[in-house]
Image (tube, grey):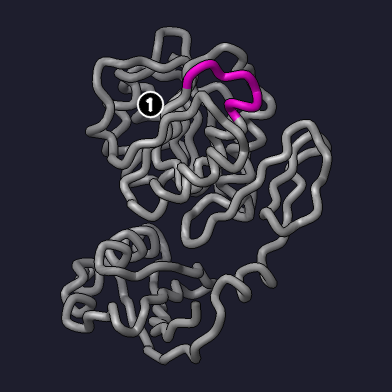
Amino acid sequence: MSQAYIEYNFTISPLQPASEILIAQLGAINFESFVETETGVKAYVQKEELNKEAVKHIQILTSEEFEINFIIKEIPQVNWNSEWEKNFQPIEVTKECALRAPFHKPFNVKYEIIIEPKMSFGTGHHETTFMMLQLILENDFEGKTVMDMGCGTAVLAILAEMKGASELDAVDVDEWCFENSIENVERNNCHKISVFQGDASFLGMKKYDRFIANINRNILLQDMEVYSNSIEKGGSLYLSGFYTQDLPLITKTCNKYGLTFVENKERNNWVAAKFCK
């Protein structure tokens, strides 16, 4: 179905964490998709869903910590599914693991994940998702219970089940991600993943052997205590969504809640790290 969209092209200085905060706040007022650029973010909303007054009252736009400017233009009506299919490329994580969309040719590898992300984060293209996939591939998930917090497309939970996890919960606060995760779980014939809509408040008394969280620095720091309380003794925490310069602060916060640094990966200044309890 063709729809008219409005593009907001934001220029942001400094970029982080303002870009991540802005994306989250725009997502709350019907913006559907985002493209991070070298200077900021391009954000898209259906023309009929645009509320210019709500945009003016976005908290981050009035923050004195950041300089944020934007220009607006209308995008001609296009078939967005067709455009997405033309631009989305399959990804080979390792010789054993590849991600593709349903319309791509099969890779015929041991771990072949079929993802139709639509507007959800988690195609494997972003450095954080790519590195988290690597960490899952390199570590033991056989017979383990798993939490995928901020699951996006549920790609990480799907790989964890393929790696032998026994029971998995995938949680995302965004309704689109929640619905998309259910579709992707079914598409990959996964039967051990339960998908829920929510945030860290979803976590209760249940504990997991493996806890995955690819979100952003501020959320990780805010919810670290809750994450730690949800990990079995001897269990592992896998984190990403932050930059190289943030690793000392992330590590310090993990240490505060009984989590010990094990290793990390870096890719274009992004970091994925493993901690043990």
- In the image, 224 versus 97, the foreground residue is 97
Q: Could one spot residue 245 in this view of the protein?
A: no
Q: In this view, does 102 lie above or below 148?
A: below
Horizontal and vertical percent position of residue 29: 25, 68
Was residue 265 drawn as part of the magenta stretch in this picture?
no
What range of the chain is rendered magenta?
A: 160-167
Residue at image position (28%, 34%) is: 200
Residue at image position (47%, 56%) is: 120
Q: Is residue 10 above or below residue 96?
A: below
Q: Say whether residue 190 is left or right of residue 17.
A: right
Q: Could one spot residue 119 in this view of the protein?
A: yes
Q: In this view, does 86 lie above or below 135?
A: below
Residue at image position (67%, 54%) is: 101
Horizontal and vertical percent position of residue 195: 40, 35
The kind of residue tagged 1 is Cys
Horizontal and vertical percent position of residue 50: 28, 80
Q: Say whether residue 157 is left or right of residue 51.
A: right
